[in-house]
C-alpha cells in the first residue's frame, strides 16, 4: 500500500514547482454542450415535496426553499397532487439546481407563477439581469421563457409557467474561452468571446442557441493579474505570463452595455496559469491551490497533490478512470483516500482502518469528470473528513471542491 504522510520534503517539492515552466499539452476542461441541441435529462438529486392543490389554487416550495410555485385559482380543473423534484442541471450555462414539476406535462387553464431564488455567488461572473428561466421539451432541447421579472433586493427571478416539465435558471450572456481553456501553460494564448444564449428581452419562447454576441459598442475589457489582454470588439486574446506570477488565477472581465437599455452586464472569467488548480471549501474557508500536479506514473498508486507552505492536500487513487470513487482509508481500486494536513500538525483524512477491528470511513466521493492518464484529471470532491486523531468516528467537517490538474513533467535541461 502506498500512503502519503506529508512532510517538509513534500512541501519543498511543491514549492519548487513555482519556478518550473512545464511543457505539457493536456487539454483544458471541455466546453459546455452546444446550445440549441438536445442535452441529457436530469436525474433526481435530493428530496421531493408534494401537495394536493385544487381549483382554489395554492403554493408549493421545493425542499431547499430555492423554488416556489404559485398556482392561481381556476388554473386546475380538479384536485391534483403537485410535486417538485430537484434534479441534476444540464441546461446550457445552467445556474444551480434544476427542478422537475409533476405530474409531467400538466397544463393550466391560466399560467402558474414560477419563482427561482439565486445567490450572489451564482451571479459572481455575470449579473442578475442576465439570468433567465428555461424549460426542457420532450425533444430534450431547452427553451427560454419570456415575461421574466427580477427582484434584485430579494434575489428572485419569476416567470409565468403554462405547464410542467423540467425547469432551470441559466445565464443568458457569458464569457467563454476557446476550447474551454480555463487553465493555460506559461506563455500560452487563448481567445475569449462574449456569447449569447437568449436575448435579454423577448416576446416568445426561443431555443437556447449559443451564438457570438453582436455587442460591439460600449464594451470595456480589463485584466487583473499577469500576462496581456488584446481586445477586438466582442472578443479578446489573453496571453499568459512566461513565469509564475500572482494573483493566480488571473481575472478577465468585460462590461457590456446595450443600446436603448439601462442594463449593464459585467462578465467575468478566471483563468489559471500553470499546472492547474485545486479549489476547496473546508471548515468555513476557501482554499485555492495553484501549485499542484497529477502523479499517475504508477497506475496502481496515483496521486493528485496540491498545497502551500502551510497546508498540503492529496487524493490517492488507483487505476484512474472517469466516474465516482467513494472515500476509503487508502487508494484502492475504485476508491480514494483524501488527506488534508496543516502546518500546525492537524490532519484530516477520509478514513482509518483501525477502531476495535472496525473501519472508520467518512461519507463522500471524488468524481473524475475527465481523466487521461499521463496528461490531466478534472473533477469534484464532496463529503466529510475525519480528524486524524479521532480514531473511532465517521463524522467530521464537510469538504467540497473541484480540481483540474496536469501531470508534472520536469523541464528538460
Image (cartoon, rainbow, N blue to C red):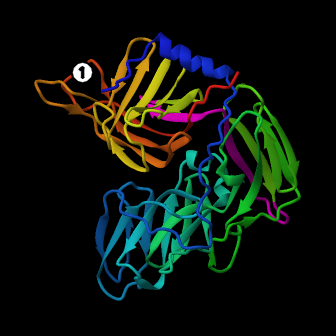
Q: Position of residue 395 (x, y in %)?
A: 26, 32
Q: Position of residue 245 (x, y in %)?
A: 72, 25
Q: Is residue 177 above or below residue 247?
A: below
**In-image side of 121 versus 266 (left or right):** left
Q: Is residue 370 above or below residue 55?
A: above
**In-image side of 218 versus 339 (left or right):** right
Q: In the rendered image, which quarter is residue 390 located in? A: top left
Label 1 belongs to which residue?
A: 390
Q: Position of residue 117 (x, y in %)?
A: 51, 56
Residue at image point 49% right, 12% down: 9
The kind of secondary structure the magenta stretch mainly shows is strand
Estimate how packed mark 1 is, as few (under 14), some (14 to 19) or many (20 or more) residues with alpha carbons within 10 Å. Answer: some
Highlighted magenta segment, given as a residue range: 258-284
Q: Position of residue 42 (x, y in %)?
A: 43, 65
Q: In what quadrant of the picture does the N terminus appear?
A: top left
Query: Which residue is at the front of the view, 293 or 53?
Result: 293
Residue at image point 62% right, 56% down: 31
Q: In the rendered image, which quarter is residue 75 located in? A: bottom left
Q: In the rendered image, which quarter is residue 381 located in? A: top left
Amino acid at each position: 500500500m502506498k500512503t502519503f504522510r506529508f512532510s517538509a520534503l513534500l512541501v519543498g517539492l511543491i514549492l519548487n514547482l513555482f519556478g518550473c515552466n512545464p511543457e505539457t499539452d493536456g487539454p483544458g476542461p471541455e466546453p459546455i454542450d452546444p446550445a440549441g441541441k438536445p442535452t441529457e435529462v436530469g436525474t433526481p438529486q435530493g428530496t421531493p415535496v408534494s401537495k394536493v392543490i385544487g381549483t382554489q389554487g395554492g403554493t408549493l416550495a421545493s425542499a431547499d426553499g430555492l423554488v416556489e410555485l404559485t398556482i392561481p385559482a381556476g388554473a386546475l380543473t380538479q384536485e391534483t397532487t403537485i410535486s417538485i423534484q430537484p434534479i441534476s442541471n444540464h441546461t446550457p450555462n445552467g445556474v444551480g439546481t434544476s427542478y422537475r414539476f409533476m405530474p409531467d406535462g400538466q397544463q393550466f387553464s391560466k399560467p402558474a407563477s414560477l419563482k427561482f431564488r439565486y445567490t450572489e455567488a451564482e451571479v459572481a461572473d455575470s449579473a442578475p439581469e442576465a439570468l433567465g428561466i428555461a424549460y426542457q421539451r420532450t425533444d430534450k432541447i431547452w427553451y427560454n421563457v419570456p415575461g421574466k421579472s427580477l427582484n434584485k433586493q430579494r434575489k428572485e427571478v419569476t416567470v409565468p409557467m403554462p405547464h410542467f416539465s423540467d425547469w432551470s435558471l441559466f445565464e443568458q450572456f457569458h464569457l467563454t474561452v476557446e476550447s474551454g481553456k480555463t487553465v493555460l501553460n506559461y506563455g500560452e494564448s487563448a481567445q475569449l468571446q462574449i456569447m449569447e444564449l437568449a436575448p435579454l428581452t423577448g416576446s416568445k419562447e426561443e431555443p437556447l442557441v449559443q451564438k457570438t454576441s453582436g455587442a460591439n459598442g460600449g464594451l470595456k475589457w480589463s485584466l487583473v493579474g499577469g500576462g496581456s489582454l488584446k481586445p477586438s470588439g466582442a472578443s479578446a486574446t489573453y496571453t499568459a505570463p512566461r513565469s509564475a506570477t500572482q494573483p493566480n488565477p488571473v481575472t478577465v472581465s468585460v462590461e457590456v452595455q446595450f443600446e436603448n437599455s439601462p442594463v449593464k452586464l459585467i462578465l467575468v472569467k478566471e483563468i489559471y496559469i500553470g499546472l492547474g488548480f485545486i479549489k476547496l471549501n473546508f471548515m468555513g474557508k476557501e482554499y485555492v491551490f495553484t501549485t499542484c500536479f497529477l502523479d499517475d506514473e504508477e497506475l496502481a498508486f496515483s496521486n493528485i497533490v496540491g498545497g502551500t507552505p502551510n497546508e498540503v492536500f492529496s487524493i490517492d487513487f488507483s487505476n484512474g478512470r472517469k466516474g465516482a470513487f467513494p472515500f476509503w482509508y487508502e487508494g484502492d481500486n475504485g476508491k480514494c483516500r483524501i488527506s488534508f494536513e496543516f502546518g500546525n500538525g492537524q490532519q484530516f483524512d477520509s478514513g482509518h482502518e483501525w477502531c476495535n477491528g472496525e473501519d472508520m470511513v467518512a461519507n463522500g466521493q471524488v468524481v473524475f469528470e475527465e481523466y487521461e492518464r499521463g496528461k490531466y484529471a478534472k473533477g469534484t470532491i464532496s463529503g466529510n473528513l475525519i480528524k486524524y486523531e479521532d480514531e473511532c468516528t465517521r463524522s467530521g467537517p464537510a469538504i467540497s471542491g473541484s480540481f483540474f490538474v496536469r501531470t508534472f513533467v520536469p523541464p528538460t535541461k
